[in-house]
Image (cartoon, coloured by chain):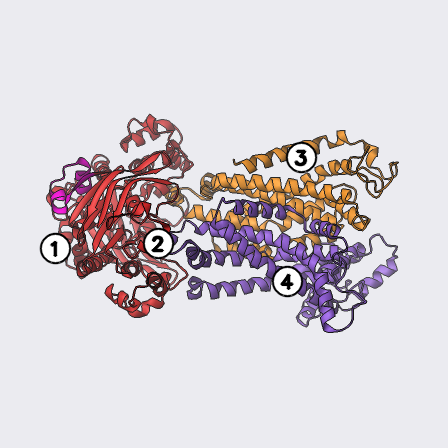
Chain colours: A red, B purple, C orange
Amino acid sequence: MLELRNLTVHHGSKRVVDDVSLTLAPGRTLGLAGESGSGKSTVAMSVLRLLPKSARVDGQVLLDGEDVGTMSWGRLRAVRWSSASIVFQGAMHSLNPVRRVGDQIAEPMRLHGTPGSVAELLEQVELPRDKARAYPHELSGGQKQRVMIAMALACRPRLVVADEPTTALDVLVQAQVLGVLTRLVAEQDLGLLMISHDLSVLASTCTDLAVMHRGAVVERGRTREVIAAPRHPHTAALAAAFPVIGDPAHRWTEPSPESTREPLLAVRDLVVDYGRTRAVDGVDLEVGQGEIVALVGQSGSGKTTLARTIMGLRAPSSGQVLFDGVPVPAKGKALKALRRQVQLVLQDPASALNPRHRVADAVAEGLRVHGLTDNLDARVAEAVERAELRPASLYLDALPHELSGGQQQRVVIAGALVLGPRLLVADEPVASLDASVRGEVVALLLRLRRELGLACLLITHDLGLAWQVADRVAVMHRGRVVEQGPAGQVLLSPSHDYTRALVDAAPTL
Amino acid sequence: MVAVLGFFLFRVVPGDPVVSMTRGRPTTAAMQAELRARFGLDRPLHEQFWSYFTGLLRGDLGTSFTFRRPVADVIAERLGPTLLLVGTATLVAVLLGLWLGVRAGWRRGSPFDRVTTGVSLTLWAVPTFWLGMLLMMATGDLFPSRGMRDTDTPPDFVSQSLDVAHHLVLPSVTLVAVVCAEYVLVMRSSLLEETTAPYLVTARAKGLRDDLVRRRHAVPNAVLPAITLVFLRFGLVVGGAITTETVFSWPGLGLLFYDALTGPDYFLLQGLLVVTAGAVVVMNLLADLLHGVLDPRVRAA
Amino acid sequence: MNRAGKAGAAVLAVAALVAVLAPLLVPADALDVTRVTDAPWRPPGAGHWLGTDHAGRSVALLVLQGTGTSLFVGLTAAVLSVGIGTLVGVLSGHFGGLAAGALLRVTDFFLVLPSLVLAIALSTVLPRGLGTIVLAIGLTSWPSTARMVRAQTLTIEARPFVERARALGGGHTHVIGRHVLPSVVPLVLVNATLAVASSIVAESTLAFLGLGDPTRISWGALLHQAQLHGAVPQRAWWFLLPPGVAIVVVVLAFTLVGRALEAVVTPRR
């Protein structure tokens, strides 16, 4: 049904897709895995010839035996959506914000003269009929993605291309959307080409799997076989990045050195209001010396607000944050002094670094702020090397955009380490990193704990990460901590319903 | 706020208005004192402001120094011609500007785009009054260049309307040319913002023709910020109207403005400032309302 | 920088040169109404390659002489306007709270007001002179810069690297000095270039309405003279065209340079 023959795509002089050949038979599901920049989205776009004019395409894309590249515009328009349709990544931007979703679903049906009703399509994706009158901004992320699926099925295509259909969705919502998609594919006997950076998502939906790396397909086969026995090292690296909860091999942490831990950080009955909404609602939490505590929750659960309040970046509405037994001051010199003790590592290192500042300046920023300018260069170099950027001299003059994501995150970590903190608050430190570097950064955090006795409050939506590194896990839901305890206990035998739902929904390989 | 500004600008900034108003004319101290008493300028500032402000609420803008009549009456008399000129010009400029802007932005870099953008940039650089003078000189006797109607036109409605329309051509062309250039550039950049939007890829993937992608998806999104900007720049039209009316002796508020500042007639200027600024503020409120009606995202909020 | 931008920059270089050299090129008594000997309203030809004005002065020399005034007013008014705008924009973007809210309100209010009307009003009530013109234009045209700088400040402040700077212990001066200002400066430069363009147009308009400095020659003032002495009914195109063309060329040059800089500063557009 879909056959790519020696597909090669150039953007300018850069080869983004390199001699890719793939086939997909009707009713089969093929997963295409790869990290950002591996060319997988370009493949998706080339199926319907949607690449910008500047891209040079060689090779053939055969849709039902017909070459998409040589079709006339009229024929191409007729084929688009009726033979193959696409579920785009980021439904938020892929739907027209000023038109009702019902009209947007109906648009291709009218265009291609397909009979059917919007209401039925909405029911298929488990949305109420009256959502047809809604505008995209009135729907949640999961609902929008389901609208995209309904839209993709509107003209009854035989092939659906899904490009990162669940990225940026929470675990529970992701499970729902994937459920809808796999059910419809099975019911309607569709061919599915699913593209994702997340092997676990592909493993749960696709019969076949192809792995892309730097534009080329490096491995291909039945999903189960590929994952069980990867032949290419890149596939192995991708697979290793998804820790299996409960698997001792994936638990990298060793028991915390001290058995009688002093609480370094203590949060007591903390309440934070955002305008009229209560973001954090009576939270108690402790982090001991040298302890790694994972704070787990979905987006909107209040975990990020809690982290900001602990850092003294937001004022609590009531309750207390104690550091070393002393309340965190609201402002002034005392707060500034505290800032040396507690450091923040943010999710997206690319935006956590000022694009105009060289690495040396970014790392030295904290020292300059605190007026610790004696021996500046040596301190900076030491911190950079501690963050495993060796030799430091190679990196000090680089600008952030010249570094990879993993290297950028190390610079952020170095900038935190240089002040000699005792607690690191890490907000999704590996979420935006590619799978292959993720493991290295996680290992770095563990090593810093071992060598420097650094405690860490790890904020994440990723239960696998929590299993990998955390001594204790606290689960946050709607502003409250619903469960906390040793990692093994919380993740393996959860006592709260919400934790159980999260653990069940976590994708596995 | 407009009222406070008007008062501040004309009463507080100049120090003694009578001195600056009579500058360059032979006046005696007694005449100045008399003028001060007549306009109430000898009372304390806060009393003056209070009487000015309460007068404003009653629609009383004071008395014109040169016309020796209530400012409100003088302004009301000149309102019609300005509304006609500004209304015609704005309508044409908005329609033409948005249309050209969409065409140019959609085919970015095409000859059409380059010509449109080039012409717009040049027109944007042209002082309105100079363009008016050039047009006047270039067209010669083809169009009347002074006033709004001839005295010898028959009094029936049709001939009068035709005569006014004939007089309207040059001033409105001038105003349209300059204002339209701005709208073209605004609309073009607004559309350019949208051309990379992912939802356009969706629309193309559905099999829509290029012009349908533009009309149904790109334009409805791009036109929203453009319309807001069009209303926001209404002050520009007002500024253009002043010089255009001055050049063509169009008997509207702009010409009145010119007359008032050559006086200078502070009370008239003050009244004009309050009225035009008020009108612009009202236009912006309208823009907000319109945006609310057109954009579902704002409607919900 | 693109080709149009380079052309604009070249034009500006020439204009600046003319402005500096004008006093040397133009003999002092050639522009004195009482001392010129030529006949008024002479069309271009031998002796005066751009003709003469109503008093018999050479239009070419008048235009050369006017360059300095127009550029000076345009530049200083733009600096004043962009300076105020940047200050207001950064302050109202960086600091929250009541004061910033009030500042924003004032900006919005002045943004919608017709700036030309305000400038006219200001130059009517203040004594005539170059300073008044600069003040009138500068004080009425800052809100758009303020708006833009504020938006940019807010964008920067929302970036994680500013949060990181705060978490490192950086205060207001650190955040503004190290992060906000450096990223605002390129946009401010672009805006300043465009502001010069609109200030020159504004100057010519004010001068045309007779609000200019009566002791100085500027392009707008020349057009004011042309209108006053009936250049249009006389069909004296040689008096009307050159000052206007000079305005258009210089303003267009500033605009093109501004847009080219903008393209450099904000990639993608």
Q: Which residues are magenta?
A: A218-241
Please check the rendered image and state whether residue C266 is part of the magenta-colored stretch, yes or no. Answer: no
Identify the amino acid type marked 3: Ala
- Residue C93 visible, this angle: no
User: Which residue is located at x 76 percent, y 41 percent?
Assistant: C217
How dense is the environment of label 1, judged by Cα within 10 Å: few (below 14), some, or many (20 and up)? Answer: few
Looking at the image, is mark 2 or mark 4 nearer the viewer? Answer: 2
The kind of residue on which mark 2 rests is Arg
Pointer 4 residue: B88
Q: Label 4 vs label 1: CA separation? A: 75 Å
Q: Secondary structure at mark 4?
A: helix
**Residue under the point 33% across and 67% down:** A132
Query: What secondary structure is found at the residue carrying circle 2?
Result: helix
Left or right position of A285 against C31: left
Which quadrant would residue A176 be assigned to in this image? Answer: bottom left
Give the mark nearest the N terminus, 2 or 1.
Answer: 2
Mark 1 and mark 4 in contact (Cβ < 8 Å)?
A: no
In space, the residues marked 2 and 3 are separated at their CA atoms by 54 Å
Q: Is there any visible trace of residue C89 in the rendered image?
A: yes
- Residue designated by label 2: A77
User: Which chain does tag 2 point to?
Assistant: A
What separation in Å lies between label 3 and label 4 (alpha carbons)? 38 Å
Q: Please state which amino acid type lies under the numbered disc 1.
A: Ser
Using the image, tell me which numbered label, if any, was put on residue B175. none
Residue that mark 3 sits on: C15
Front one among A371 and C175: C175
- Discs 2 and 4 carry the same chain letter: no
* x and y percentages locating residue B162 in the rendered image: 71, 66
Numbered disc 1: what chain?
Answer: A
User: In the rendered image, which residue does mark 1 sit on?
Assistant: A493
Q: Secondary structure at mark 3?
A: helix
Tag nearer the camera, 1 or 3: 3
